Structure formats: C-alpha cells, structure tokens
Amino acid sequence: MFEQTFKNIDDILHKDAGATSELDYTEQTSWILFLKYLDALEQTKAQEAVFVDKPYQYIIDEAYRWPTWAAPKTADGKFDHNNAKTGDDLKDFVNHKLFPYLKGFKQRATGPNTIEYKIGEIFGEINNKIQSGYNLREVIERIDELSFNTQAEKHELSHLYEAKIKNMGNAGRNGGEYYTPRPLIRAMIQVTNPKIGETIYDGAVGSAGFLCEAFDYLRSQANLSTSDLSTLQTSTFYGKEKKSLAYVIAIMNMILHGIEAPNIIHTNTLAENISDIQEKDRYDIILANPPFGGKERAEVQQNFPIKTGETAFLFLQHFIKSLRAGGRAAVVIKNTFLSNTDNASVSLRKLLLESCNLHTVLDCPGGTFQGAGVKTVVLFFEKGAPTRNTWFYQLDPGRNMGKTNPLNDADLVEFVNLQKTFADSPKSWSVNTFALSAVEGYDLSVKNPNGNEEIAHRSPQAIMAEIATLDAESAKVLTQIKALL
C-alpha cells in the first residue's frame, strides 16, 4: 500500500507546475510527510502521558496540528470533506500562516538539539512549491493514509523513502550528491565496526545515508539496554549539511529510521577554521562521501593549512582534524587523489600518511556511483600513528555496473572478509607505505602486482608524453604512405 501511495503522490506532483523534478517531488513529499509524522509522534506521547497520569504539552498549537488543517475527521473517524481546506484557501493557509508559524520555532526553541529547533530550521529553509491548492489537497490525503504506528510500518516507510532518494540521484542534475550506494556504506561500517557509546560524524551528510545505516547497524546489536537506546537517540550521530534540500531530506530520513531529534546542523562545514577544532569537537568515527569536483572560494581555503579549491581535499583535512586519537574513518574520494602530482595532493597524502594509519584502500570500479563518471576509492584510516603498510583491494564484481546492475552487498563480502586479516588474494595486496618517499610524491597508485590491469590515474605529463609519441608515430606512417603514392 505504501509503495502505491508514493507513486500516486509523484503522479500528482508531476501534474503541478511548481514541482518540476525528482528533487522537487522528494522535497515536497518530505515536508508534508514530516508534519504527518510529527502528529503521530505527538499522539503517541499524549497517550503515554495518559497511562502515567501526567499532562502532555503539545509542541504544535491546535490550529496548526495535522487533524485541524490537513485531515479533519468526522465523529466516526472518516475524512471530513466539509471542513477540510482546499484550493486557494488551503494554499494561502499553508504559505501565509502554517509555514511562518513553523519557521518561528527556531527562535522559540530552548536549544539546537530539540525537535522544536529542527522544525524551525526545516520550515525556514524550504517553501511550498505546489502551486495548485487542489493538487496539494490530493497529496495531503494520500499522505494521511500512511501510518507510523508500528516498527514494521516505520521500517517500510524508511525503505521507500530511501528509494525516493535513490531515484532523485538517478534523475541527474545535482541529485546524485545525496546518494551513496547503501551496500558500499554498509561495507564501510562493517570495517570501521562502531560500538555503542562511540560518536559517529558525517560533515557532508547529504541524505544522512551513513548515519541511518550506522544507526541500523548498532540498533541490531543484541541485548541493548534502555540506556543504550537512549545513547543512540541522543548522543551518537552527528552531521552537518550546507544545502537546504539535503538538510531537509537528512532530517526526514533519520526520523523515519527512528531517530526523533537528529543532531544535524545546517551549516557550511568548510566555513569553519580547522584550527578552531578542539578536543570536545572531535568524534570517534567518521563516515563520509564528501562532494568532489566542487571549487571553494579563496576565503574558504584560508581555513585550511593545505590550500586547494578541491572541495573533497578540504573535507579530508577537516575529517583528519575532527578525529579523536584512536578514532577511525572511512571516506570516499576520487581515485586521482592517490597519484595526482600537484602540491595540494602531495601535501595531503603526506599529512594523511604521517598523522594517520591508512590501513586500507578499497578501489571501486566505474559505475559504482550511478550517474557519476568519476572513479573512486574508499580510504580507511585510524588517527594517532603513522602509516606503515596499506592493504589494497581492487573491487571487481565481474560485470559492468549501472542502473540495471547496481552494486550489491554480495559484491563486497570478499572485501570485508579479507580485510579483517589484510589477506593477499588475486584482488588484494599490501604495500610498504612507510617506504614511500617525498621524491616520488607519496604516490599511492593502485598497482595490482597480481597481473590485474592497473587502474591508477596517470599524471598529465605522462598523458602528454604518450600523445606526443602517438603523434610522432602517426606522422611517420603518413610519411611512409605518401612515399608509396
């Protein structure tokens, strides 16, 4: 039923002039879904208060609660069409009364880690884009059909919401920024192996896929106490996100996974000077896929000791600084990072190898990230001791990957198993990283000694030299042909 409901909502939004893409569909579904969820949460808490004979103070005033404006019911529990706003009345109420009221929670909240603050931030960052009040009424009625009453229902809804995020990434434009393949995330979590009580951070949180999967991983542990569950809810997962749409989606995604008041901050992580990061600002585990290919302004680069316009390189500096001593990280980055000869790349590799133990590099094949042509690696490192040896694994699922053949969990089973002992295999090998020299630029190129094709990025000089050689050979052949004519 839930899957059909989401499809019906997309069909309605497709007809509306204000929603023009999968990104819009997800955003508009998100804010309405959030309010429906919030009402269900309040109803549950009110019922629990009755059982313990305590009053419950509603977060939302009655005029703005879901049953009042969105889905009024008759005495027998049926939808009350006579008292339900629609058309221009509904649109005007949402745009001019509901959104300003909800936006005001940010100023009224007691602190940033409260659900009131999250409400204020969400509705301060997005707008209702649905232009037809009649389409808005239809979407609201479809979402009102959804139920959050059981864990099974919440699990199904979170699964479907993840599917919407994936579709958003497949739709192109900048949607791909928000989606990292979940099998890859799960493998990264298995290798870093977080424990209850450790803090987990993603400074480029996107749709919060890393934090949601880490929550599922820890929640599935056996014999969790009430204290453990409280720790998972309040003081385990942390994130930062710059873009408004991604921020809203991250909040909604974590809520659907079961975290009531996510510790996600809407901010530009890179605007923070890393010299200001103190011990209290550090984390036990970092899981991230920072945006690559972006260019940061000169004033942002001044926040980092290694100056570069490459966004991912700035994030990597931030992550190294944000790890506690002994902390563990798994970070996705372009494979060109391993061998580029520019000063920033060489300096950053030196920093990583000298301040952290880069124990594992997972080399991902093309097509791992749908819609992105770049090749990537995952860096696994622990802070506090220099790198001595690095274990490489060259992932090869044995097929061309894409939308119809995406990465799956089975593709990564061998990697996870071999990584535990850094075992050699036709796809894996170890390198004495400590012996890498500054003269060679701390080159970490993926060079499988077992005969597999090298998938290292070549330097511009090598490419130009090969072009010159081919040009010379072509000229020679042409000369020979002319001599024969």
Image (spheres, rainbow, N blue to C red):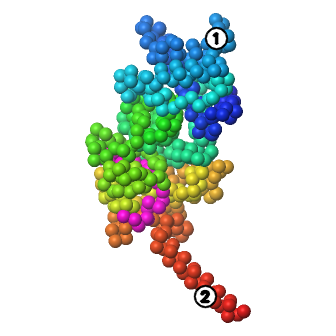
Would residue 129 be visible to someone looking at this image? yes
Label 1, residues with CA under 10 Å away: few <14, some 14-19, many ≥20: some
Q: Position of residue 36 (x, y in %)?
A: 56, 22
- The residue under the point 52% across, 60% down is 394
Instruction: Say if 256 sits above or below 323 in the image.
Output: above
Residue that appears at 35% across and 50% down: 299
Q: Earlier in the sequence, mark 2 or mark 1?
A: 1
Q: State which quarter of the image contains the C terminus.
A: bottom right
- Foreground pick, 24 / 209: 24
Residue highlighted by disc 1: 83
Badge 2 amino acid = Lys
Residue shown at 39%/43% (left/top)? Answer: 269
Q: Nearer the viewer, residue 408 or 101?
A: 101
Query: Percent x, y for residue 327?
Result: 34, 46
Question: On screen, 108 above or below 320?
Answer: above
Q: Residue at x 56, y 22 (%)?
A: 94
Percent coordinates x, y for residue 205 in the rendering = 46, 41
The spot of residue 64 in percent (x, y) is 52, 16
Tell me, for residue 476, which label it has, or none: 2
* Three-letter amino acid code at the position of disc 1: Asn
Kindly state the secondary structure of the residue where label 2 is placed.
Answer: helix
In the rendered structure, does residue 242 fall within the stretch colored magenta? Answer: no
Q: Is residue 412 shown above or below 261?
A: below
- The boundaries of the magenta stretch are 316-343
Label 2 Cα crowd, 10 Å radius (few <14 / some 14-19 / many 20+): few
